[in-house]
Image: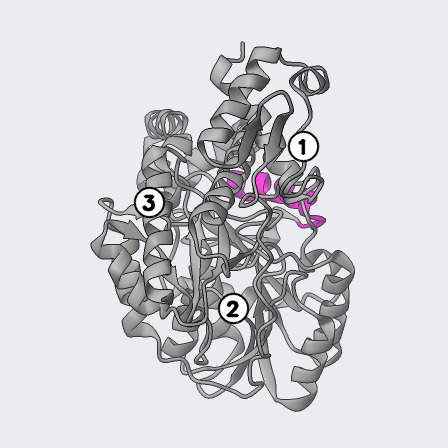
Amino acid sequence: METTEFRYRSVERHVAELIASAAIRPGDRLPSLRQLSRQLGVSISTVSQAYLELEKKGVVVARERSGFFLSDSAGRMPAPATRPRPEMVPTSSSRSGLIQQVLEALGNRDLLPFGVVCPDESLLPARTLSRLLAATQRHHPATALDYAPVAGNMELRRQIALRCLEAGIAVTPEEILVTSGAMEGLALALRALTRPGDNVLIQSPSYFCFLQLLENCGLRAVEIPSSSGGIDPEDVRRAIERFDISAAILVPNFNNPDGSLTADEDKRDIVRLLAGRNIPLVEDDVYGEIHFGEHRPRCCKSFDTSGQVIYCSSFSKTIAPGYRVGWMIPGRYHRRVLNLKTTTNICTAAPNQMAIAEFLREGYFARHLRRLRSVIKNQMESLLLAVNRYFPGETRASFPDGGASIWVELPAGVDTVDYFHRARQKGIGLAPGSIFSAQDRYDNFIRLSCTGIWNDAMETGIRTLGELARDLAD
């Protein structure tokens, strides 16, 4: 049975969706209590409670005998401005020092987790996984203590193959390799495809661990824009015509940090363009399952007819960051990647694989994902409303259709590396924009995570960040 709190928060979410879609604008009258009560199937008192909560947050204002109106400060923020295109030139990344500082802050549990993109522990199925882990060790003690097959637990690979169908990927268990998180898959792919000095195509902005990986492998990044519409095939075409590209690492579904989603037809065109020049594509799809729409977006791998797309994903962003269980579909590079894994870590921990296989087989994963998507979407809406309320008027922010973060553009004078250090001193974690590019870009951007539980402390943290942004912008 739904609680009263759940019901009134569902009304708040409905209003947030109206704001996000621009169905209502600042100054517009909100639906009457009776009208929204009928529309949502809740009581008038529930709608009234929701409106009063929104009034406390400054989202709506009450006018005597006239009803509730959207406040002037509650309109949806514009998306980040179109930035000058990244210079299309091979660039060696050198962000490791700052990235290490950010990673250290992200691991600090004393900081408010606006920099952490893994779900809050209360959103993870800890009890169920612990029970399954104990059961597998009790029923199969020898298997749990032994090395797993290099390619991974067969039952887990079967379950992953079934999940892949939702992404449009038809694959056999034998084509899947289990990895120690998605990052191991990405590292294996680059080792299999490149040599030091090679050029690798990436998005801009791009996940900072990609940049670290390129730096450690002695590779150079060729950056193409990641806009609100994702990756433009024309940018891919220009890059591969101009440079000798050895591989591409792309995140078509909810790119970290900007949350951009590439249209399916563009994914198909990108795969064709790269295949036409025999350039392998490494696809990172760790956020593909965290979509807010009715259907899961397809992957580039689903358009692959030649085996040149290496698909990588993991369970770290959905159920168990600490288990370090991911997977990859290496396509025509399978044997090469398998040989590299054999000499890297032999196998991924057997008990963790067994527990996750049972979690999928028993149907827990699908149910868990439905709840996780709903919670993260609601938290993203709350975060965006708070940023809109507390940050300087020139602030812009993305509003993705999935993923775990928003990409925020602060006023031009704000140096977000300085901002990051000041925020940490105030007990708040975040990721400064400059670590998401190999070039000197995004100095006034930050990534804010939506995976921490939204509460009064989180709202206070956003208010503090807003005040700090105003101080630095003056």
Q: Position of residue 461 (x, y in %)?
A: 33, 45
Decide whether residue 164 is among the magenta residues.
Answer: yes
Gap in angstroms between the C-alphas marked 3 and 2: 25 Å
Q: The disc labelled 3 sits on which kind of residue?
A: Gly
Query: Can you tell which quarter of the image residue 161 is in?
Result: top right
**Crowding near pointer 2: few (<14 within 10 Å), some, many (20+)?**
many
Labels in figure, total? 3
Q: Secondary structure at mark 2?
A: loop
**Crowding near pointer 3: few (<14 within 10 Å), some, many (20+)?**
many
Q: Horizontally, is 429 left or right of 178 in the view?
A: left
> Which sits in the foreground, 5 or 366?
5
Q: Horizontally, is 374 left or right of 447 in the view?
A: right
> Which sits in the foreground, 46 or 268?
46
Name the residue that disc number 3 marks.
Answer: 461
Name the residue that disc number 2 marks.
Answer: 205
Q: Position of residue 381 (x, y in %)?
A: 53, 40
Vertical comparison of 466 with 219: above or below? above
Q: Secondary structure at mark 3?
A: helix
**Which quadrant holds the C terminus?**
bottom left
Looking at marks 3 and 2 on the same chain, the residue that comes earlier in the sequence is marked by: 2
Residue placed at 75% from the left, 57% from the top? 264
**Crowding near pointer 1: few (<14 within 10 Å), some, many (20+)?**
some
Q: Is residue 209 visible from the viewing direction of this image? A: yes
Q: The disc labelled 2 sits on which kind of residue?
A: Pro
Gap in angstroms between the C-alphas marked 2 and 1: 38 Å
Vertical comparison of 284 with 51: above or below? below
Vertical comparison of 358 with 236: above or below? above
Name the residue that disc number 1 marks.
Answer: 29
Residue 5 — which label? Answer: none
Segment tinted magenta in the rendering: 155-171
> Which sits in the foreground, 301 or 136?
301
